[in-house]
Amino acid sequence: MSVSVDPTTEPTSARPTGNESAEALRPHAEHAFAGELAALAAQDDRPRPARWRLSPWAVATYLLGGVLPDGTVISPKYVGPRRIVEVAVSTLATDRALLLLGVPGTAKTWVSEHLAAAVSGDSTLLVQGTAGTPEEAIRYGWNYAQLLAHGPSRDALVPSPVMRAMADGATVRVEELTRIPADVQDTLITILSEKTLPIPELGQEVQAVRGFSLIATANDRDRGVNELSSALRRRFNTVVLPLPESVEAEVDIVARRVDQIGRSLDLPTAPDGIDEIRRVVTVFRELRAGVTSDGRTKVKSPSGTLSTAEAISVVTGGLALAAHFGDGVLRAGDVAAGVLGAVVRDPAADRVVWQEYLEAVVRERAGWTDFYRACREVSA
Ligand SMILES: Nc1ncnc2c1ncn2[C@@H]1O[C@H](COP(=O)(O)OP(=O)(O)OP(=O)(O)O)[C@@H](O)[C@H]1O
Ligand SMILES: [Mg+2]
């Protein structure tokens, strides 16, 4: 027998309340970009897969940005190869699950949230993978008061986000899949291949309805913590998210995100510090690559990842400093401490790497004297 899960029986308060957009520190994508999603839905005349809010084409446009026939501008959410987004979206339109793989800070979580928001209008069906994620987080749990009082029944069942998504034909996200213990990961195998979730206690099952899809993210660096079994891996289409290919692309990503975050935090300045952003990004890229951007000088790489995500937080921190304790203009002195904090993770080894880089590269670079001084000051 198949059953559908009635969302009103959910005893936890994890569901969105609907009034979260105004005051939420970080609104969900479907609220933050509600205007863009509505404009896309209104002008999208291409065929939509069952229960999709938009056509695959419109979902890709939502992620990559564009201009609609009526002139509405859709801001780019993901900056990177178009093909990656097209492959991801078309995977969701099939019955295969999507695995976003990449080094830290390559927007895996960000892309999965926006995909879920665009496809299903809801990015909140989420399982956060940790070493302690239990099977119940993927299948279902029980409300023990109900269970003891009335025995196993549908009322006592607490559906997981995965079960909800199956019943509603929606998109569910599993974050950090490879941190989940292997036996718990394997719970997904039946779900992904048979598209059903048995409830043996009730002699029932929940069958996925059309529109159900699953997006998992996993970190390259975590590979080996809990390897994905080959049985599970076969059930995913894997899309690898690359690091931004050029300085300009990365500066663009950082500037965009910092602008958005700055506005949501009411930072009293417009982030006009594009030169400072370029310097932070250049430093991060050179240290990551182990060579200067002109290819002439080899440098050592520190232990931290120095991802785009970290550049975004360094610049956001710098903006707050400039806004509250400076003259509102982002300067080298505002980002120097953040850069140091991001680069020097291991106080002994990374400090040496950083000092060498400062002296050999930053010091000699034309126009970087203020940056060199500011970094020397905080490193002292
Ligand atoms: N190519 C990109 N396009 C747009 N934004 C990006 C890009 N790369 C990174 N970002 C930004 O970086 C931030 C961090 O991304 P996110 O948290 O999704 O990374 P992640 O890959 O999930 O990292 P982790 O492995 O640590 O979980 C986001 O705010 C996102 O906007
Ligand atoms: Mg993530």
Image: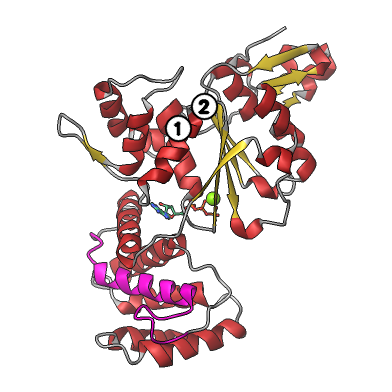
Q: Is mark 1 within 8 Å of ligand 1?
A: no
In this picture, is 95 found above or below 308? above
SS at circle 2: loop
Decide if residue 300 is in sight here. yes
Q: Position of residue 279 (x, y in %)?
A: 33, 74
Quarter holding residue 29: top left
Check if residue 296 falls in the magenta segment.
yes
In this picture, is 290 found above or below 183? below
Whether residue 237 sits left or right of residue 67 in the image: it is right
Quarter holding residue 165: top right
Residue bearing mark 2: 94
* Residue for point 19% across, 34% down: 72
How far apart in space, not on screen, are marks 2 and 1 (Cα)? 7 Å
Report crowding for label 1: few under 14, some 14 to 19, many 20 or more residues within 10 A (C-alpha). some
Check if residue 132 falls in the magenta segment.
no
The residue closer to the viewer here, 218 or 327, is: 218
* Residue for point 34% across, 57% down: 253
Q: Quadrant of the N terminus?
A: top right
Q: Position of residue 370 (x, y in %)?
A: 29, 86
Asked whether disc 2 touches disc 1, contact meaning CB atoms under 8 Å apart, the reply is yes
Residue bearing mark 1: 90
Whether residue 232 sits left or right of residue 240 in the image: it is right
Magenta segment: 270-298
Quarter holding residue 39: top left
Q: Position of residue 338 (x, y in %)?
A: 44, 72
